[in-house]
Image (cartoon, rainbow, N blue to C red):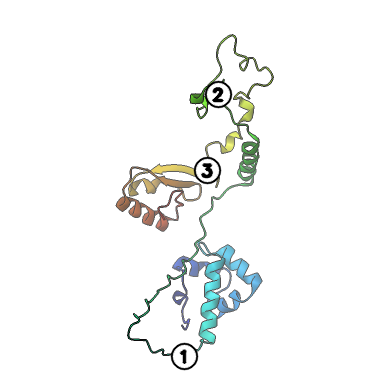
Amino acid sequence: MTVKDFKDLRGITDENIEELKTIGINTVDELKAAVNDDAKVKEVIKTLSGVGPKTVASWKDAFDGAAAPAKAEPVKKETAKKDEEPAAVVVEAAEAEYVVKKKAELDAETTDALAKRALISGRRPAFKRQEWFRYAKFKDSTWRKPKGIHSKMKRRLKRRGPIVDIGFRGPASVRGLHPTGFEEVLVYNVDNLDKIDPKKQAIRIGGTVGTKKRIAIEDRADELGIRILNRMV
């Protein structure tokens, strides 16, 4: 395959072409030189949206194939016996292109708060309701506040489980955010995407949405650059 234009490369978009110009790459030859330079490759991946290491590697292979096309190996003809059936042709699926997931644009304070929340969540104990060990029906039950004047758990005596307390909560600034830093927004149709901020918000498609409408929502979200937290595929 001969690469004469940017569009001949797999996974490149018009937006990527404009982004290449910002780092001084205006021609296909300049891009070819960049993908063969390790330092330049890092700059290309960092600058281009939706382009990862696998996509750049496929560009490099395309350029190498254009420079020195591989010779096709001769096919050996084998005489099949009359009783044998012809072998089934196995078609290998093309390797799926890797697309880097969109990341939230966070300030330093929010990033630190998310890291702190992850540490707090890791050491937070499992809160179990009073006398969960005595009754089988309480084994998987959710937390219940201990009540009663004789409750040893309520009085915080030794050898009793921990009680839910305000000190176990995470930072208030990132409370309710997705682990990626996005604010989750539940959507049910394409019109709900018009009010989404792709830099700070990500969508979660409602469970009652059918396949046809879900595909339409995913296609429109990709056009707007919105991250989908529960993509169908």
Of mark 2 and mark 3, the one earlier in the sequence is: 2
Looking at the rendered structure, the secondary structure element under dot 3 is loop
Residue 27 visible to the viewer: no
Q: CA distance from mark 1 to mark 2?
A: 72 Å
Front residue of 166 and 211: 211
Residue 138: x and y in percent read 51, 24
Of mark 1 and mark 3, the one earlier in the sequence is: 1
Kindly check if marks 1 and 3 are in contact, taking CB atoms under 8 A apart as contact. Answer: no
Compared across the picture, whether 171 is left or right of 228 comes to: right
Q: Amino acid at mark 1?
A: Pro
Write down the residue under mark 2.
132
Residue 74 is tagged as 1
Compared across the picture, whether 70 is left or right of 109 comes to: left
Q: Amino acid at mark 2?
A: Trp
Looking at the rendered structure, the secondary structure element under dot 1 is loop
Residue 24: x and y in percent read 58, 72
Q: What is the residue that sits farthest to the front in this orientation?
A: 83
The residue positioned 57% from the left and 66% from the top of the image is 53
Q: CA distance from mark 2 to mark 3?
A: 31 Å
Write down the residue under mark 3.
178
Of mark 1 and mark 2, the one earlier in the sequence is: 1
Q: Is residue 144 above or below residue 206?
A: above
The residue positioned 51% from the left and 47% from the top of the image is 200
Q: Image quadrant of residue 174? A: top right
Compared across the picture, whether 224 is left or right of 144 comes to: left
